Image: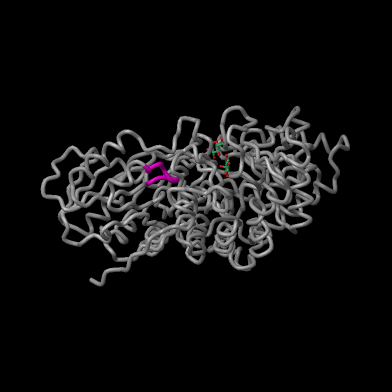
Amino acid sequence: MTLEEKVGQMAQAERGAIDGDRDQITTLALGSVLSGGGSVPADNTPAGWADMVDAYQAKALATRLKIPLLYGIDSVHGHNNLVGATIFPHNIGMGATRDPALVEREEQITAIETKATGPQWVFAPCVCVSRDLRWGRTYESFGEDPRLVSEMAVGIEGFQGEHKRDMATNRHVLATAKHFAGDGDTKFGSSTSGTYTIDQGVTVTDRRTFAKIDLAPYVTAVRKYGVGSIMPSFSSVDWTEDGVGNPVKMSAHEELLTEVLKKKIGFDGFLISDWAAIQQIPGDYATQVRTSVNAGMDMFMEPYSAPQFIQTLIAEVKAGRVKMSRIDDAVRRILTAKFELGLFEHPYTDRSLAKTIGSPEHRAVARQAVAESQVLLKNAGRALPLRKNARIYVAGANADDIGNQAGGWTVTWQGSSGNIIPGTTILDGIKQNSSHVTYSADASASMAGSDVGVVVVGETPYAEGVGDVGNGHTLNLSDADKAAIDKVCGAIRTCVVLDVAGRPQIVTDQLSEMDAFVMSWLPGSEGAGVADVLFGKRPFTGRLPVTWPRSEAQEPINVGDRAYKPLFPYGYGLRTRPHHH
Ligand code: BGC
Ligand code: BGC
């Protein structure tokens, strides 16, 4: 390979940057293309995707060496960019299930649905350990305890298959453990980017604690599950034992990327930088590129700067500031993944399983996950399960909104409210179980004659730092949600409140009004799974994957803290027995 061909393999461009001039894939000898959140083909169907990815692939195969392209995408709760895919609960809900085998099945299904449309590589799972609910990415985390997160890292096997043996089949994809490391353990108000308050911030810690809390899931991901790629985090690390005040960006962190991850932990896959993350390293572009490559980064997500990246890295190698041995190491790692995926033999999309996308079988697994993820936090007078013939009054902004129920990273990066994907809402599920349902989002309809009120409150979608508290968001319930609870719980004898949100919300003052309180998380496309536990078709078994605070000011609060007086502790969750109909 020429230097140009090698460096091309190390570059990844955004779909939107090359779509208008696809020959760039050939002329740059590009190694990879990604779809960022919401970066979808005009025809957002399985065939539309496969046609697009295959057209890009043809351009890669037109190069001298015919090295196939790797297409990456954020399938973080199903193939979530595709309308019609099976959308699973976000990771925080999967953490609540305490069911690693279910996470493995989720990712098997996600691998099938993703690969049938072209992409062979997912930027998932997030094995982040969320230590502060004010983080806008809390819902991408399986929980606050590194042991729980490590157990759920089995999702890697769902994606890649056991020991990557079947990774070349239409049932598996290459996985990415992200974001290495400490992304969920940053200090509030420590941001180095200026824009956000906690996302992309600084993990201020000592090496021992960092290993215990933040690195632990990566040891499992690498040694037990052989994860093929890892994405270093936007965040920085500041070692207290070295004297605070010298945060180093993960994309530039040679100690952690090379000495710890590659040498000590033994990671033999490749590192993919996060979205233009190297551009946050101090210095000019040449310095940023050189620093990151020399720190151990192998492939570079430079969404709109891939040509400049290639040009710059070639110049750095020629100037002797980056060794050819480092380039060879990076390219060897990338090509190994392409061989393991069987791309040289089968570069084009195998569409045969496209018919299973969003199938009843796949949705049934998601529905089971929804049911298992529900956490029953209060159940006075055995308000739950509901009686089948009860007259039910349903209220609240999140009762009948599949967009809110799916959250961020659904069709678009930020997600959105409304009827954006096919599936069932929580209200749909309730209606499947009872013919006496009155629905009034703002609780304005008459409540006379109702036996039970079900109020579904919660958050509207957000992703990444946009959802940080202090960035327009709060853990407190909205005034409208509080009013709906007051109104319904004040008027109807039995009152059940469901929280549809990516993280616990402050309900300390409302709890006494409720007979039952359920944390529903962000269930995704199969809202009917919520009704399955409400009506006792399945038992409540979910347990909190994070500590539930009394107030926003209590954050950060985590299991094991010396002073620990939360509203509900980590691991809490009441159980019910299923009804026998
Ligand atoms: C996020 C990653 C994601 C990437 C590509 C970044 O902003 O931090 O989690 O994989 O974008 O969409
Ligand atoms: C993309 C995301 C990416 C983000 C980074 C968005 O425009 O859609 O995938 O994570 O930018 O800021």
Q: In this view, does 292 lie to the left or right of 575?
A: right
Image-quadrant location for residue 387: bottom left
| Residue that appears at 56% across and 31% down | 196
Q: Is residue 164 left or right of residue 319?
A: left
User: What residue is rendered at 42% in x and 40% in y?
Assistant: 461
Q: Where residue 506 appears, x then y in whole percent?
A: 40, 41
Task: Give the percent coordinates (x, y) of residue 326.
Answer: 82, 47
Up-down relation of residue 255 to residue 442 (above or below): below
The magenta segment is: 500-508
**Is residue 161 visible to us here?**
yes
* Residue 66 x, y percent position in the rendering: 69, 51
Image quadrant of residue 274?
top right
- In the rendered image, the vertical position of residue 578 relative to residue 395, given as above or below: below
Quarter of the rendered structure image containing ligand 2: top right
Q: Predominant secondary structure in magenta?
A: loop
Residue at 61% across, 49% down: 178
Q: Which of 156 and 477 is in front in this view?
A: 477
In the picture, measured across the screen, residue 8 lies left or right of residue 200, that is right
**Quarter of the image where the C terminus is located:** bottom left
Nearest to the observer: residue 242 or residue 508: 508
Residue 124 visible in image: no
Q: Which residue lies furthest to the right in this view?
A: 320
Looking at the image, residue 103 sits to the left or right of residue 365; the answer is right
